[in-house]
Amino acid sequence: MTQTNSRSLLSRALLIIEPIDHAQAEAALSRVLERDAGALAAVIAAQGNARPLLEGALGSSPFLTELSARDPARLARLLTDDPDASLARLVEATRNAAKGVTDEAELMRALRRAKQEGALLVALADLSKAWDTMQATDALTRLADTALAASIAFTLREAAAAGKLELYDQRMPERGCGWIFLAMGKEGAFELNYSSDIDIIVLFDRARARVTQPAEDVDLFVKMTKRIVRILSEITPDGYVFRVDLRLRPDPGATPIAIPLEAAFSYYESMGQNWERAAFIKARAAAGDIPAGEAFLKELSPFVWRKNFDFAAIADVHSIKRQIHAFKGHGEIAALGHDLKLGRGGIREIEFFAQTQQLITGGRNPALRGRATLETLDALVANGWIEPRVRDDLAEAYLFLRDVEHRIQMVADKQTHILPRDEKEALRIARMAGFATLEDFTRALVAHLETVQSHYSHLFESAPQLSSQTGNLVFTGGEDDPGTLETLSRLGFAHPKTVTETIRGWHFGRYAATRSTKARERLTELTPALLEALAVTQNADQAFLAFDKLLAGLPAGVQLFSVLVSNPRLLSLLTAITGAAPKLAATIARRPRVLDAVLEPAFFEHLPDESELAAALARSLAETRSYEEALDAARVFGQEQKFLIGVRILTGALSVAEAGLAYARLAECVIAALLPRVEAEFARAHGRMEGRVCVVALGKLGGREMTAASDLDLMLLYDADPHAESDGERPLAAAAYYARLTQRLIAALSAPMAQGLLYEADFRLRPSGGKGPLAVSLTAFEDYHAHEAWTWEHMALTRARIVAGARDFAATVEAAIRAALTRPRDEAKTRDDVADMRRRLARDKPAKSLWDLKQAPGALIDVEFVTQYLQLRHASAHPACLSTMTSTALERLAGLGLMDANEAATLIEAARLYQSLTQLLRLSIDADFDPAQAPRGLVELLLRGGEAADIARLEAQIAETQRATREIFTRIVGA
């Protein structure tokens, strides 16, 4: 008869598991006995509880069956020995595994076989209740610590043998090595679950490490750390030891896996997050240079344990849990399919219940700084923070849930915390937990979950909800939450992993805007609403990346995030910009300060007039110290103001009809402010000229119908003695002087500079176009338009307007323009010239679709040509019909009886429709518009601008408008 000691695992067994299928259980045991040399059979024959215990364990777990079949004699030994003694022997053997080993493969085999034995020992002791739950977690943690220590010792000796570093103690290579391994999470608290990863932060102390090439220390420790990960995690025919997770280190996406101490201190002092404070509650120097690790944790203590109550930080830590269940109905307490770790009432809520209260008062009371969950609950009772009843409820639930968690993982050694949805599989777990029926088990489980949720909810009952309908949104830590990826996919993000990785980067403070604790707290609250808002755009991923680019450019984020949290309107605006107007989003990314104006209370109610714009630009220019700085300042001002006009258009605060005037007013302001600076800068080299100049606007600027993308059609006229010279060091004759001055003005407006581009300036509408002089004297202008100008040049002149220059000269120029437009004309020739010009445009610039709102037959060109033709035809007899603005000119023509009132109304309505849609398109995109490919936000903008219910009706409206306009054009001008 086989003898067992009185403390053997079999003699200490308190629970015999009932398998769900006795035939399978017997088959599993038979498979093991087939490989038995007799030792296991002897134990089964001698010990009455051995067979039922083994049938219950092996019949419930294919994983345990596999481990047992590998070495039945090992199984027999574990059953008949004291499990505490078995563990001590195994830990010692693991610790010594690296001694005398020179081959990495040999070490890996030894560690994996030790893990196999440890996994079998813990499972049998836990399932039989020879050990309680926390004894099992303690055993798993000790095995992890010693496996890690053996790997470190081996790697250090190898590095020393290779001449990479010097060891302080050959017998104990980790002593004084400066290589620190901090165990985080459950390993740090001696609470590892059965199939747990081990969460490690690896640091090194440059003052302790004796690296032979100090300049390469990061590279060396990174390579050695990678070797540790491979030794422990690589799957071989013997399995693996522990999966190693290094993602709890500072900003894992941007830092090496082994970090110098000074870099770690710098991170935690400047960018450490509240969830990291919570994580460090359980941190423990587990391996490597343990004294150095303990010194690091002691020095980091002020970061973790703040002296003052820190309820803001608690809200931030709690937001992790709130994000897990941030929509109604998600994660409701259930049994089948419930996540025992992250689900409502689960293990994480018990841990957070303890940790958040530790963070509140642990800085003032060291008694509340314990790592272990159950010990912390006891300390909370002892210090008056919770009632004994609450502690007892939570402790009982914690042990129950950890037990069930272990059994879920024991089935196949999978790192999962979810109870199976299949009833048969769920019954397997119930039986492993000692329940006869699934009903009894689920009743007990739900009761514990509800109890935990009740206490947890009471603790945080005043915490605001992040969202009511979003879904799982967890971006803390270093790994993707599966539920979060599912939520993002459901919202419409095609690349959810990119989103989660990017948002984690925000929380790690990679951008200036997210480096402060308050900024990250506000961002945490904002994230669900932000993602929902981005998701309603046509391309959620593109909108998200645009917002990320915006965020990267912000110098600070607290103010903006706080405003967005409390101001859904502004959040909707930002996401509308990123989803509908990529051009505006690019402006925000380049110039984040433009948002400051949007935050002004009066922004949406007040549009600055000419005097306010001029004063603002003057202030900007006054702060510059050079001509180049002034040009850059003008670019910043112009770009920001164009952005603000665009925002007003998007939000409806500015009608599209008013937008053209607003853009034109801005351009006039910039030209008027830059002209004197250009003249002064030019005079430094060439002196002054006795004469006068003015800048004439034509085209869209002249007609006050500019868009966000409009060029500036300009002409510079001057009045000076043609024989005079300037008075500078390098004098120039009048014609050359003003031609060069005009070049300087073009460069001031159009040259790309450090702050980008301001406007494209086009001077080709001057007399003789590109063949004529760049600057034109008033005399030459008058003579040209009296004798040489083509009809199309007079058509362009109908929109001429003075925007800058000497006031007294402006009146003279206006009179000259008026004289050119009011001279008598040959009606038939004028009509034929206009029709010919339209035919040339149709030939040279054919419309691609009806969305070519300028060139298509019946589009804006037709409206403008009709208007300009009628003005030229009737201006000599009726000068009052002249106006640079198309709609105003049509109204005057109809009012004077010079055209049919109904036709004028049709053309005015057509112009408004085309200009409205064109404003929105130029504001949003640079490419041709294709409704099938356009962002949904842009399509909605166009529907609003065209007052249409859907895109099909809008296109029908455009087509009908173009048909009606073309008919009027043909009747008035000709085919």
Image (spheres, rainbow, N blue to C red):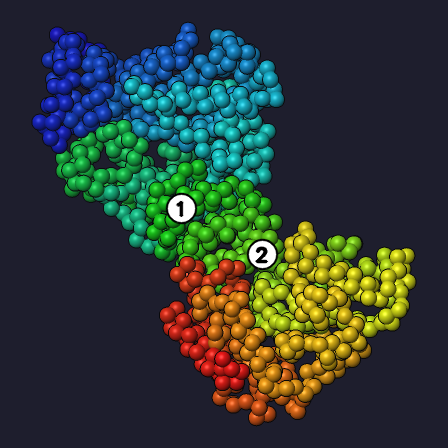
Q: CA distance from mark 1 to mark 2?
A: 25 Å
Q: Which residue is mark 2?
A: 587
- What is the x, y in percent for residue 463? 43, 52
Residue depicted at x 58% and y 45%: 512
Using residue 363 as the reference point, say whether residue 5 is left or right of it.
left
Instruction: Say whether residue 601 is visible.
Output: no
- What is the x, y in percent for residue 611? 71, 72
| Type of amino acid under label 1 | His
Using residue 911 as the reference point, say whether residue 10 is left or right of it.
left
Q: Which residue is mark 1?
A: 495
- What is the x, y in percent for residue 745? 74, 62
Question: In this orientation, which residue lies closer to the viewer: 929 or 652?
Answer: 929
Seen from this angle, which residue lies furthest bottom? 897
Q: Is residue 940 above or below residue 947?
A: above
- What is the x, y in percent for residue 888? 59, 83
Around disc 2, counting alpha carbons within 10 Å, would you say few (fewer than 14), some (14 to 19), or many (20 or more)?
some
- Quarter-wise, where is residue 194 in the image? top left
Question: In this orientation, which residue lies closer to the viewer: 814 or 81?
Answer: 814
In terms of sequence position, does the residue under pointer 1 or pointer 2 come before the other? 1
Residue depicted at x 11% and y 30%: 21
Instruction: Say whether residue 686 is visible.
Output: yes
User: Under tag 1, what secondary structure?
Assistant: loop
